Image: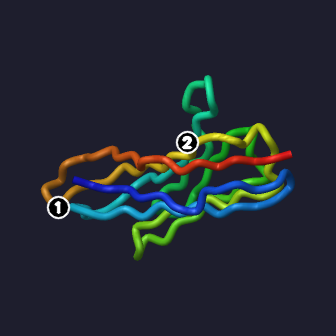
Amino acid sequence: QVQLVESGGGVVQAGGSLRLSCAASGRIASIANMGWYRQAPGKQREWVATITRGGSTNYADSVKGRFTISRDNAKNTVYLQMNSLNSEDTAVYYCNADSMTPQLQFVRSWGQGTQVTVSS
């Protein structure tokens, strides 16, 4: 089993910043892609950003230039730095990870989610 634990959510004023963290633990041999998704009230979960093990990144157009995804492979942790937040960024943010167990089993895992609320 692989567990992902997010932290760093909260309430922030429009224009402010937050940094989310997500730490993976459990039966992990290596982690390939790690990413962030979000789900706003009444909407479907949407992809936000992805980072490969080598550090290549991709972003949704809605966050490009404002959010930065990064990771620490030694700590099995992924981060999401969010700047210039606006009300449309209000959502529950979920991290995910594609990992390989020592038994060479592929596992896609999800965190429990952390609430980000942007007040105007």
User: Real-space Cα distance between discs 1 and 2?
Assistant: 27 Å
With respect to residue 38, does 16 lie above or below? below
Q: Position of residue 65 (x, y in %)?
A: 79, 52
Q: Position of residue 49 (x, y in %)?
A: 60, 47
The residue tagged with tag 1: helix, strand or loop?
loop
- When asked about the image quadrant of residue 108, the answer is top left
Contact between marks 1 and 2 (CB within 8 A): the answer is no
Left or right of 97, for residue 42: right
Q: Amino acid at mark 2?
A: Tyr
Of residues 110 and 55, which is closer to you in this image?
A: 110
Q: Residues within 10 Å of mark 1 (few under 14, many from 20)?
A: few
Q: Residues within 10 Å of mark 2 (few under 14, many from 20)?
A: some
Left or right of 103, for residue 95: right
The residue located at (81%, 59%) in the rendering is 16
Reading the chain from its start, which is encountered first: label 1 or label 2?
2
Name the outermost residue toward the bottom: 74
Q: How is the image coloured?
A: rainbow
The residue located at (78%, 53%) in the rendering is 66
Tell me the tag on residue 37. 2
Q: Position of residue 106 (x, y in %)?
A: 25, 46
Foreground mark, 1 or 2?
A: 2
The residue located at (80%, 47%) in the rendering is 119
Q: Position of residue 26 (x, y in %)?
A: 25, 62
The residue located at (65%, 49%) in the rendering is 116
Q: Which residue is mark 1?
A: 102
The residue tagged with tag 2: helix, strand or loop?
strand
Q: Amino acid at mark 1?
A: Pro
With respect to residue 97, does 53 lie above or below? below
Of residues 38 and 48, which is closer to you in this image?
A: 38
